[in-house]
Amino acid sequence: MEWIIVSLASLFAGFVDAIVGGGGLVLVPALFAVYPSAVPATLLGTNKSGSIWGTSFAAWKYAKRVQFRWRTLVPAIAAAFVGSMLGAWALTQISADFLRKALPFILLAVLVYTLARKDMGQNNQPIANPHKEIALGMLIGLLIGFYDGFFGPGTGSFLVFAFVRILGFDFLNASANAKLLNIATNFAALLLLGWKGHIWWHLAIPLALSNIIGSFLGTAMALRYGSGFVRWMFIAVVTVLIARSAWDGFFS
């Protein structure tokens, strides 16, 4: 019965993550609720064993319709991989409890800024200076990669916001390009947490299959309805993430 519950959560997480990220705040709480006595690092690692497949599928689907900026993405992916590896190592050494309390306030700031800037993410206008774009992309990858390896929930949404606000992408292109960094961060954390024995491999297959199904549905909707739809989904998801993370951080 437990694997059915978390598989359904993984399906919904894949749907949300394919559009705007944030699937971790669907699946991770489900894992903690179903397996309350498990080591947190194990549940976070098991989450990534499923979510990486949905994210990879979404990236493959987006690649058919959206242009990836490889010049910026390749060094950013490398930085994200390193950052996530460092974050996953830090997770095995220290507690991430302080981030549980900080996360809703960070997400609230992201939401307020997005609502205030109604034109943000409507037009795709990447930075003209290639060196600046590459440097900023690497910084985004390193910092958010560390966060993903160390804690994780909301990573996809943070990547989308950073690509829109800092790199000048529209929401659809930001969601598509950010997927590749998210794959790198998930893979790095998966390697280290797997090596440390913090993954339940018996759950990996049902979580992965469910996540891919959800990702298929989410990607199809994003491509059909475009950047405006992705923006409103981003606002809706971040709003839910604020409530969910506030509950987890202060009331659970």
Image (tube, rainbow, N blue to C red):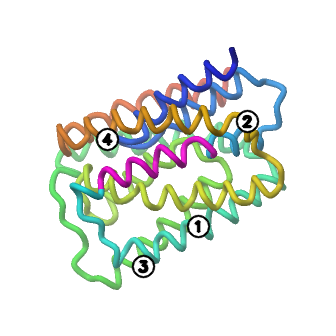
The mark nearer the N terminus, 4 or 1, is 1
Density class for disc 4 (Cα within 10 Å; few <14, some 14-19, many ≥20) is: many
Q: Amino acid at mark 2?
A: His
Q: Secondary structure at mark 2?
A: helix
Residue at the bottom extreme of this rendering: 131
Q: Gap between marks 4 and 2, in whole Å?
A: 27 Å
Which residue is identified by label 4?
Answer: 219
Q: Secondary structure at mark 3?
A: helix
Which residue is identified by label 2?
Answer: 202
Q: Are marks 2 and 3 in contact (CB under 8 Å)?
A: no
Q: Are marks 4 and 2 in contact (CB under 8 Å)?
A: no
Q: Amino acid at mark 3?
A: Ala
Q: Quadrant of the C terminus?
A: top right
Residue 213: quarter of image: top left
Residue 190: quarter of image: bottom right
The mark nearer the N terminus, 4 or 3, is 3
Q: Viewer-nearest of labels 2 and 1?
A: 2
Q: Amino acid at mark 4?
A: Thr
Which residue is identified by label 3?
Answer: 135
Relative horizontal placement of residue 182, taking residue 30 as reference (left or right):
left
Relative horizontal placement of residue 201, taking residue 207 as reference (left or right):
right
Which residue is identified by label 1?
Answer: 81
Q: Amino acid at mark 1?
A: Phe
Residue 249: quarter of image: top right
What residue is shown at x 29% (from left), y 82% (from top)? Answer: 130
Density class for disc 3 (Cα within 10 Å; few <14, some 14-19, many ≥20) is: some
Who is closer to the viewer here, 7 or 30? 7
Density class for disc 1 (Cα within 10 Å; few <14, some 14-19, many ≥20) is: many
Vertical side of 127 occupied by 46: above or below: above
Q: Gap between marks 3 and 1, in whole Å?
A: 15 Å
Who is closer to the viewer here, 56 or 192? 56
Residue 228 % position (x, y): 18, 41
